[in-house]
Amino acid sequence: MHRSLKELYLKIAEGTASFNSAEIEILDEVLTDHFDNPKTTYILFEEKDNDKLLGFAIFGRSPMTKFSWDIYWMAVDKGSQRKGIGQKLQERIEGYVLGQDKKANLIIETSSKPEYDATRSFYLKKGFKEMGQIPDFYKEDDSLVIFYKSLITSK
């Protein structure tokens, strides 16, 4: 049962053409852990139109922190991009983490490759700040780009 559902998530990620085969393998492992391990720390949100999966996000509390959260994956079906799906997922994540704590730090790590230009632009438009880069992190000429957003509830 979970296998066919997992394949839908993988198909969306592959369809973005942003993720390489190693990244898809890691996503496969994360999804397996999420579906097979009830105590997993991964939280999965999805956006659908009726029964059609349009996009998903996987996130969780950063290990050894009080109120920091990592967004590990966010992918929107190629045909559904630029229609607010990513924004809805981001808003749901923010609402969830602020429901857990009065304050939250969101951290996203991504690549400096040109294929990720739209991704990095999306995060900046959603209020994230680029906090730095580690050169040649993934491979030569492919740096790790770290984004951060601070959230505080009015409660």
Image (tube, rainbow, N blue to C red):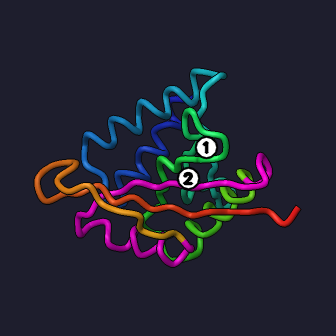
The vertical placement of 94 against 37, above or below, is: below
What amino acid is labelled 2 in the image? Phe
* Residue 5 in picture, x, y percent from top left: 54, 38
* Residue shown at the point (48%, 47%) measured from the top left: 72
**Magenta-colored span:** 98-127
Q: Reply yes or no: does residue 97 show up in magenta.
A: no
Marks 1 & 2, CB-CB < 8 Å contact: yes
* Residue shown at the point (26%, 55%) measured from the top left: 134
* Residue 66 in picture, x, y percent from top left: 66, 40
Give 5 or 107, whichever is nearer the viewer: 107
Residue that label 2 marks: 56
* Residue shown at the point (31%, 66%) measured from the top left: 116
Image quadrant in which the C terminus is located: bottom right
Left or right of 128 in this view: 95 = right
Residue that label 1 marks: 44
Determine crowd level at label 2: few under 14, some 14-19, many 20+ residues with C-alpha closer than 10 A: many
Mark before the other along the chain sequence, 1 or 2: 1
Rendered image quadrant of residue 26: top left
Left or right of 79 in this view: 14 = left
Q: Reply yes or no: does residue 119 show up in magenta.
A: yes
Give 147 or 38, whichever is nearer the viewer: 147
The vertical placement of 100 against 123, above or below, is: above
Left or right of 154 in this view: 83 = left
Rendered image quadrant of residue 7: top left
Secondary structure of the residue carrying numbered label 2: strand
What amino acid is labelled 1 in the image? Leu
The vertical placement of 137 against 33, above or below, is: below
